Every structure is written in structure tokens, then in C-alpha cells.
Amino acid sequence: MNTEELFGLAPVVPVVVLDDADHAVPLARALVDGGLPAIEVTLRTPAAVESIERIAAEVPDAVVGAGTVVTAGDAERSLKAGARFLVSPGCTPRLRAAMADTGLPFLPGVSSASEAMALLEEGVTAMKFFPAEPAGGVPYLKALGGPLPQITFCPTGGIRPGNAADYLALPNVGCVGGTWLTPSDAVRAGDWDRVRALAAEAAELRPA
Ligand code: 3PG
């Protein structure tokens, strides 16, 4: 899989924070059933790596990735756990090299033209735009598309059902990401029907 194929999986990539690895499989099934197969499990909790392992092993229709990859070690352990793509909130030369070494598609985070150009120099043309809303939102991303049309972004940070379609309408947006698909109270309560319904609504934002 390359980043273009990753962007083609669905208009929205759920960004997931899991405190309990027992939630990983039913949550992933609900997202996949709702129409969102690409799932970013953030490495923000002790349960993250085991959650990635379980989804990779038990939910064959899911394409599970690792998010909040901030060190070379994070990239390596994500690969070992079975992650199929990597996402980071920012980027350093060392992290970019480590992510590239995994052979997985990866989305390094940027929020400025200079950061994006530093990655372009390394041949990277797919990036996360983070934090999307605080950094300038749709008008900012649209403006970056003028001089840098060769970059495709996955904006995340502050994206919700009310503004997702505006991002997806931009030619330089491949997909959007966000945590709204998996509200923490729904996850804690095991309310997978609610997660499935939120995913189904998001999957309609644009044909995959
Ligand atoms: C991310 O890492 O992409 C963000 O935490 C997503 O933030 P959100 O809660 O605003 O969707």
C-alpha cells in the first residue's frame, strides 16, 4: 500500500485513543462495519501497541495504523505490532528516516510551508496537516495548495462533521482524520452501535 491507496480507503481516518486493549477489536469492527477501514491507533496509551496487534490479527478488513509516532523506536514497534501505516504530529530528519525505513506508508505532520518543503526535498509528498483548525484551517490549507500543489494532506485536529466536508472539497486533501468517531464515553461503555453510526455518517462525506 502507498499513501495514495491509503487516502483512497475512506474519506475519514478515525484517530483512536484506547485505554483498554479489550476494546480494540469490537471498536475496529464497528468502524469497519460503518465503512471506515483505515484506523489510526495513537501511541498515547500503554494499551496502544497491544491494540494494534489485536486489530491486525483479528479484524482482517481493517487497515490499522499507528499514530502519534514521535520517535524512531515508535516507528519500529509499530511495524512489529502489525501497523500498516504511520502518522506523526510533526517531523524531524531522524524520525522521517526511521519511518521510511519501515517500508510502510507514512504521514509526517506539518503546519507550515517551510516544514512541508523540507519534506518535499526528501521526496515526501503526502503529509498530515496538524493541528488543522488552530493552524489556520481550510483557508490556510487552500493557500498552501497554490505554491505547493504536489502535496496531498490529511488534516487532523479540530475536524468534526460540521467542517470535514469543507476540507474534503479541497484538491490537496486526500482524507481527514479525527477523534469524533470514537467518543471516550461510547468506548468506555462499549457502545459500538454508536461508533458504527458515527462511522457510517462519516463514510458518506465523500465516496471512497
Ligand atoms: C490527532 O492526533 O490527529 C488529534 O489528536 C486529533 O484531534 P481531534 O480530537 O481534534 O480530532
Image (tube, rainbow, N blue to C red):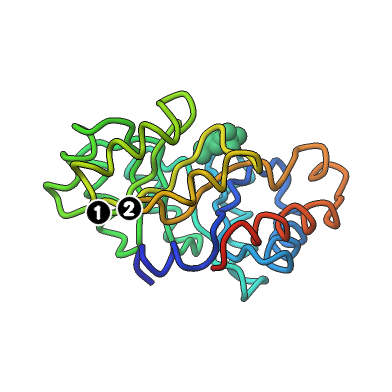
Left or right, 83 with reference to 178:
left
x then y, percent, for residue 88: 40, 42
As drawn, the residue found furthest toward the left would be 121
Q: Position of residue 100 (x, y in %)?
A: 26, 56
- Please tell me whether mark 2 or mark 1 is closer to you in this view: 2
Circle number at residue 125: 1
Q: Residues within 10 Å of mark 2 (few under 14, many from 20)?
A: many
Q: Is residue 192 above or below residue 180?
A: below
> Does the beta carbon of the residue at mark 2 sit less than 8 Å from ligand 1?
no
Q: Is residue 100 above or below residue 82?
A: above
Quadrant occupied by the N terminus = bottom left
Q: Position of residue 193 (x, y in %)?
A: 85, 57
44 and 201: which is toward the camera: 201
Residue drawn 45% across and 32% down? 137
The earlier-in-sequence mark between 2 and 1 is: 1
Residue 12: image quadrant is: bottom right
Say whether residue 96 is left or right of residue 81.
left
Q: Residue, x 57% and y 44% (percent of image)? A: 164
Q: Secondary structure at mark 1?
A: loop
Image region (quadrant) for ligand 1? top right
Residue 135, numbered label: none
Quarter the C terminus occupies: bottom right
Where's residue 147, x and y in %?
18, 41
Q: Nearer the viewer, residue 63 or 111?
A: 111
Task: Report the amino acid beneath label 1.
Answer: Thr
Type of residue at label 2?
A: Thr
Contact (CB < 8 A) between labels 2 and 1? yes
Q: What residue is at 36 percent from the left and 66 percent from the top?
A: 4
Q: Which residue is mark 2?
A: 152
